[in-house]
Structure formats: structure tokens, C-alpha cells
């Protein structure tokens, strides 16, 4: 007999019911009134996204208001949702650039390897993928799924893609264009390990960047639950030294990098300037990043006067951006 679980499911709330529900949690509607809040939820964003930022605000630990929010207006949540959206745009732009220039880095470095013809390393990698014990043919299957695309058909028309056979002899300059970012990182790991290249030291950083890429590509909130300590792993030494050079102390580094999202953003800020070689692209991102950080984020800074968490995180990234993302005319 199938158990009826309907009684355990939370009923869907209408937009008109959400404001009273938030008021029960001591979320105020003084700066942004109830009518405008409902209008925003109906036309601009959904309840789940907007209210995810409430976790960045403190609750009363005891007394009459135990578990309810301290000094939280709906306007603060609305402001954070807009900041989050703008932040995702800049981060996605940076990560796409990292992906592009990582491919260029591979192509440039492979020219200096005598035993490489641009086919050998790809054949070795595809052979490994074909015979992988845990996830056999994962890259093979990914490639074959793309065959239906008109764009990729032009590339694949000259290759034997029989699903029972190992794919061979795709040149690296084409292979890099048909794999995902996650697959690119795995290939980069294999390539740098095969030829004992120093660039292998960036692998763990790239994997964190890829996690952020997946989040921003799917429009997931990246500025919610910033107080969560969900990453107990020791940070990469390259990052530790990078933050030291930014004047960020040991305890501050430990606290901030214990949050997965802050760690991913930090790793992206570090790696962008390492991988991207175009000064024009760097200056373009510098402009966007500084406009976001020193104009939009602080537009309503008075909302966060009593929020020590968000002020601390802002100061942390301020030190990173001020040193590493100056506009060209600011560099002495």
C-alpha cells in the first residue's frame, strides 16, 4: 500500500500570502512597502530566491522574538537579490574568459613538447576515458551527444563516431572546442600530469571555479548563506599566499574560506589574472568589477550598518579587488 504523503507536503502559498508570512518572521515592510514587495515578487523575482538572503541576517537568540529576524526589511532582501544578479554576470564573464584562455595556454604550451603532434595527448586521454573503470566512456558519450548539433556536425563529419568504438585522432585544437569546462579541467589535469608541467598546481583551484561556473550558469544565488561553514578542507597554498599579499590575516582567511561560495569567488578572482593573458580583457573586467563593487554594492550601504557578517565579507573582498583589480590609469 502506498503511503499518502500529501499531509507532509508544505502547501504552495499565493503571493498575497507571502507578505503576512514574512511579517511573522519579523521582516519589516517600511522601506519597501507591502504593495511594492508583492509587485516585485510577481514581476521581477520569486519568493525562494529573494528570501534565500535572509540567512545573512541575525535572529534573536532568546526572549519574546526568539528565532525571528533582527533589523531586516524586505528592501534589504530585494537589494541583495539585485546585487547577486549583477555579481553573477561579472563572475560568469570572468569564468568564460578563464575557460577561453586556459585553452590558449594549453595550445601554446604544447608547441614546446617535442613528442607532441597535437593528436597524441588527445588519443591517450580518450583511451583512458574509454577504458575507465569507474566512469567508462563519459567523454565519448558527451562528444556523441553533440553530434546532433549543426555546428558540431561540421567538426565530427570526418571522424568515426560509432558508439561501440574508441574515438581517435581528433586534433587538440578541435578537441578543446567540443568538451565542457569540467571536461577541459580533467583533460588539463591529465595533460599536465603526463608531461609533468608546473601548471598542474592550478587543478584544485580550477575545480572550485567550475563549481561556481555551474552555479552562475544556472542562475543560482551566490550571495546567500554566507555565514555557513561548509568547507572544512585546507585551502590551496597559492590562495593562502595570495590573501597574505592582500593583507588578509590568518583568522580572517580561515573564517572566509570555510564558506564554499566565498572560497569559489576568491579562487576565481585569483585565477583570472593568472590565466587571462589579454590586457584588454583584464581591463574590461576590472572596470565591470570595480563598478559593481564600488558603486552598485554600496548604493544602499546604510541597509547593512548593523550587519557585521556582510560588512566583514565586503572588507575581505575590498582588499583583494583594491590590490589586484585596479584600472590601468590607477597603476603606479
Image: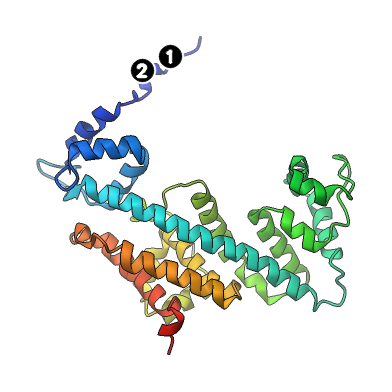
User: How far from the left and from the top, in percent, is residue 101?
Assistant: 64, 68
> At 50% from the left edge and 12% from the top edge, which residue is drawn?
2
* Element type at mark 2: helix
Question: Which residue appears farthest toward the left when viewing the image?
Answer: 64
Colour pattern: rainbow
Seen as rendered, the residue at the extreme top is 1
Tell me the tag on residue 85: none
Q: Is residue 133 visible?
A: no
Report whether 77 appears left or right of 202.
left
Q: In whole angstroms, how far apart are the C-alphas of marks 2 and 1?
A: 7 Å
Q: Mark 1: which secondary structure? A: loop
Vertical order, 197 against 54 (above or below): below
Looking at the picture, tell me which residue is in the foreground, 161 or 64. 161
Q: Residues within 10 Å of mark 2 (few under 14, many from 20)?
A: few
Above or below, comparing residue 208 to residue 202 in the picture: above
Q: Position of residue 282 (x, y in %)?
A: 52, 73
List the residue tagged with mark 2: 7
- Residue shown at 66% from the left, 60% from the top: 185
Residue 74, x across and y down, in percent: 22, 45
Give the side of residue 231 with respect to residue 56, left or right: right
Residue 175 found in image quarter: bottom right
Q: Nearer the viewer, residue 259 or 103?
A: 103
Q: Nearer the viewer, residue 21 or 159?
A: 159
The local crowd at label 1, few if under 14, some if 14 to 19, many if 20 or more residues have their Cα within 10 Å, is few
Q: Residue placed at 22% from the left, 40% from the top?
A: 36
In the image: residue 288, left or right of residue 167: left
Q: Is residue 240 visible?
A: yes
What residue appears at the point 34 percent right and 37 percent down from the top-left corner?
A: 43
Q: Which residue is mark 1?
A: 4
- Tell me whether the residue at label 2 lies in contact with that at label 1, contact meaning CB atoms closer than 8 angstroms: yes
Amino acid at each position: 500500500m502506498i503511503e499518502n504523503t500529501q499531509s507532509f507536503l508544505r502547501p504552495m502559498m499565493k503571493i498575497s500570502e507571502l507578505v503576512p508570512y514574512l511579517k511573522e518572521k519579523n521582516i519589516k515592510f517600511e522601506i519597501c512597502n507591502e504593495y511594492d514587495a508583492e509587485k516585485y515578487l510577481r514581476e521581477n523575482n520569486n519568493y525562494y530566491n529573494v528570501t534565500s538572503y535572509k540567512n545573512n541576517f541575525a535572529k534573536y537568540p532568546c526572549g519574546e522574538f526568539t528565532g525571528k529576524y533582527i533589523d531586516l526589511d524586505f528592501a534589504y532582501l530585494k537589494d541583495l537579490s539585485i546585487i547577486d544578479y549583477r555579481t553573477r554576470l561579472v563572475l560568469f564573464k570572468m569564468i568564460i574568459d578563464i575557460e577561453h584562455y586556459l585553452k590558449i595556454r594549453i595550445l601554446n604550451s604544447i608547441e614546446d613538447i617535442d613528442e607532441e603532434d597535437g593528436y597524441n595527448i588527445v588519443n591517450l586521454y580518450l583511451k583512458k576515458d574509454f577504458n575507465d573503470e569507474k566512469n567508462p566512456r563519459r567523454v565519448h558519450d558527451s562528444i556523441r551527444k553533440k553530434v546532433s548539433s549543426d555546428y558540431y556536425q561540421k567538426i565530427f563529419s570526418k571522424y568515426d563516431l560509432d558508439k561501440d568504438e574508441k574515438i581517435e585522432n581528433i586534433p587538440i585544437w578541435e578537441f578543446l572546442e567540443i568538451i565542457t569546462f569540467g571536461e577541459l579541467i580533467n583533460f588539463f589535469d591529465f595533460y599536465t600530469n603526463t608531461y609533468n608541467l608546473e601548471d598542474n598546481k592550478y587543478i584544485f583551484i580550477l575545480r572550485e571555479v567550475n563549481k561556481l561556473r555551474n552555479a552562475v550558469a544556472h542562475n543560482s544565488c551566490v550571495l546567500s548563506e554566507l555565514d555557513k561553514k561548509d568547507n572544512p578542507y585546507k585551502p590551496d597554498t597559492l590562495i593562502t599566499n595570495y590573501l597574505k599579499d592582500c593583507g588578509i590575516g590568518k583568522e580572517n582567511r580561515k573564517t572566509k574560506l570555510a564558506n564554499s561560495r566565498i572560497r569559489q569567488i576568491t579562487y576565481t578572482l585569483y585565477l583570472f589574472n593568472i590565466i587571462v593573458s589579454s590586457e584588454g580583457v583584464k581591463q574590461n573586467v576590472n572596470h565591470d568589477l570595480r563598478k559593481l563593487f564600488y558603486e552598485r554594492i554600496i548604493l544602499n550601504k546604510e541597509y547593512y550598518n548593523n550587519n557585521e557578517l556582510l560588512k566583514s565579507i565586503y572588507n575581505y573582498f575590498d582588499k583583494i579587488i583594491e590590490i589586484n583589480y585596479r584600472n590601468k590609469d590607477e597603476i603606479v
